[in-house]
Image: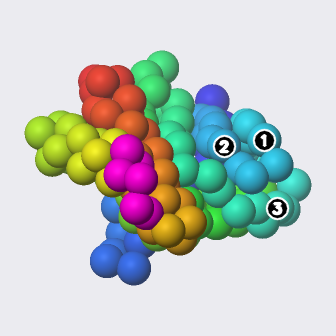
Amino acid sequence: MKTIKVSVVTPDGPVYDSDVEMVSTKAQSGELGILPGHIPLVAPLQIGAVRLKKDGKTEFIAVSGGFLEVRPDQVTVLAQSAEKASDIDVERAIRAKERAEQRMKEQRLEHTDFRRAELALQRAINRLAVSERRM
């Protein structure tokens, strides 16, 4: 079966680098599925999971936004942060979720602080969802 090279990179360094059969993820414009030979594309990503199909199994990487660049033979994800499902500290993600929920409940938050808390909550929920899909 044909494969496509996938690299997931953050400001802290590479997170994933392998050949896969299929990539799917959520872009700002909607769900994307990428197979080898896909037309070139650049798209901003939402907070969500990058799903990588390889050898009949699916691997998950939690990303917190960024960009996806697709070339016929390579996919590069430039993410603000990214974690493989196996690397997610579930207890830390639960604490982050609880902190964000508490901040959102506080009536005194300004709009900017509320949005920041809302994004933190989305990131924590995404990390927890991806961690549940560990192989």
Side (left or right) of 46 relative to 42: left
Q: Are marks 3 and 2 in contact (CB under 8 Å)?
A: no
Q: Residue at x 71, y 50 (%)?
A: 27
Judged by depth in the image, the label closer to the viewer, 3 or 1, is 1
Q: What secondary structure is found at the residue carrying circle 3?
A: strand
User: Pointer 3: what residue?
Assistant: 41
SS at badge 1: strand
Whether tag 2 and tag 1 are in contact, CB under 8 A, the answer is yes
| Label whose residue precedes the other's in the sequence (3 or 1) | 1
**Quadrant of the image containing the C terminus:** top left
Question: Disc 1 designates what residue?
Answer: 30
Q: Residue at x 82, y 61 (%)?
A: 41
- Is residue 84 something one can see in this rendering? no
Q: Is residue 104 visible?
A: yes
Q: Hey, what amino acid is under mark 3?
A: Leu
Please state the extent of the stretch shown in magenta in the rendering: 104-109
How would you classify the magenta stretch by its main secondary structure? loop
The N terminus: image quadrant: top right
Above or below residue 92? Residue 15 is below
Nearer to me, 57 or 47: 47
Residue found at the far top of this picture: 56
Residue at image position (31%, 77%) is 12
The residues tagged by marks 2 and 1 sit, at their Cα atoms, a distance apart of 6 Å
| Residue 81 coordinates in the image, percent (x, y) | 40, 64
Pointer 3 or 2: first along the chain: 2
Where residue 4 appears, as percent x and y from the top left, is 62, 49
Instruction: Classify residue 87 as left or right of residue 8.
Output: left
**In whole angstroms, how far apart are the C-alphas of marks 3 and 1?**
13 Å
Q: Position of residue 99 (x, y in %)?
A: 24, 50
Q: Are marks 3 and 1 in contact (CB under 8 Å)?
A: no
Q: Nearer the viewer, mark 3 or mark 2?
A: 2
